Image (spheres, rainbow, N blue to C red):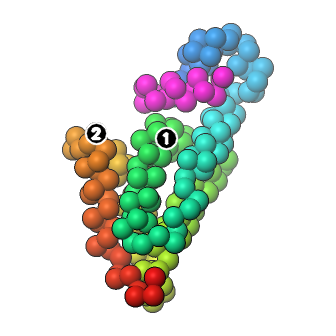
């Protein structure tokens, strides 16, 4: 309940919640929060691990063998849902990563999973590219579907969920080479 309270507070307000705010939201005393977590940093790390496991459950582990249009739609919509739900935590992680090797490691792990998923989703198309260009394309798609890219489209430009997904889908489709005929 403490972790869920922390995450709910982050979603409501971009500022890192205090122990008192987390305790109030969770229905505990501040002392109870610190009985479960030695400090707020430990709570941040635990919340990150919890969110990471939930996001992994939300991510499709199928669809890698569909046609191009199906894979694009599946990948973009999955990534958009994750960005929508976990953007506040992502921002908090990045704001605090300088203080913590644990958070820095988790950020790196999340980024590695995102690029790994890109490589799986678009394997047929990426297989057509020589190594340097393949890696550059993966990195370009990764930059395109970053949390902050999603936030800019939604918060700054005011695009709907569907409009934002369309932007990503069209951009990824343009970045990828043609799908091989045998795929």
Q: Which residue is mark 1?
A: 86
Q: Secondary structure at mark 2?
A: helix
Which percent across, then down, holds residue 131?
Answer: 48, 86
Which percent across, then down, holds residue 137?
Answer: 40, 75
Q: Which is nearer the eye, 98 or 181?
A: 181
- Can residue 153 be seen at all in this image of the molecule? no
Instruction: Specify whether 49 is left or right of 173.
Output: right
Q: Name the residue at 61% across, 48% down.
A: 57
Task: Specify start and end residues of the magenta stretch as a single range.
Answer: 1-15
Instruction: Specify whether 79 is left or right of 171.
Output: right
Quarter of the image with the N terminus is: top right
Q: Which is nearer the eye, 31 or 67?
A: 67
Mark 2, residues whose alpha carbon is within 10 Å: few (<14), some, or many (≥20)? few
SS assignment for the magenta stretch, majority:
helix
Instruction: Specify whether 20 is left or right of 138.
Output: right
Q: Name the residue at 61% across, 42% down.
A: 54
Q: Which residue is mark 2?
A: 155
- Badge 2 vs badge 1, beta-carbon distance below 8 Å: no
Q: Secondary structure at mark 1?
A: helix
């Amino acid at each position: 309940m403490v972790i869920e309270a922390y995450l709910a507070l982050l979603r409501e307000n971009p500022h890192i919640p205090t122990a008192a705010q987390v305790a109030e939201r969770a229905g505990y005393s501040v002392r109870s929060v610190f009985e479960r977590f030695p400090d707020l940093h430990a709570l941040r790390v635990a919340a990150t691990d919890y969110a990471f496991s939930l996001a992994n459950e939300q991510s499709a582990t199928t669809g890698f063998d569909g046609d191009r249009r199906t894979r694009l739609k599946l990948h973009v919509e999955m990534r958009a849902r994750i960005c929508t739900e976990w953007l506040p935590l992502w921002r908090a992680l990045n704001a605090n990563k300088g203080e913590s090797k644990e958070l820095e490691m988790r950020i790196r792990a999340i980024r590695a999973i995102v690029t790994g998923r890109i490589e799986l989703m678009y394997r047929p198309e990426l297989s057509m590219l020589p190594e340097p260009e393949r890696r550059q394309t993966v990195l370009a798609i990764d930059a395109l579907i970053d949390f902050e890219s999603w936030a800019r489209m939604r918060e700054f430009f005011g695009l709907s969920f569907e409009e934002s997904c369309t932007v990503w889908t069209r951009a990824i489709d343009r970045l990828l080479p043609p799908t091989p005929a045998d795929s």
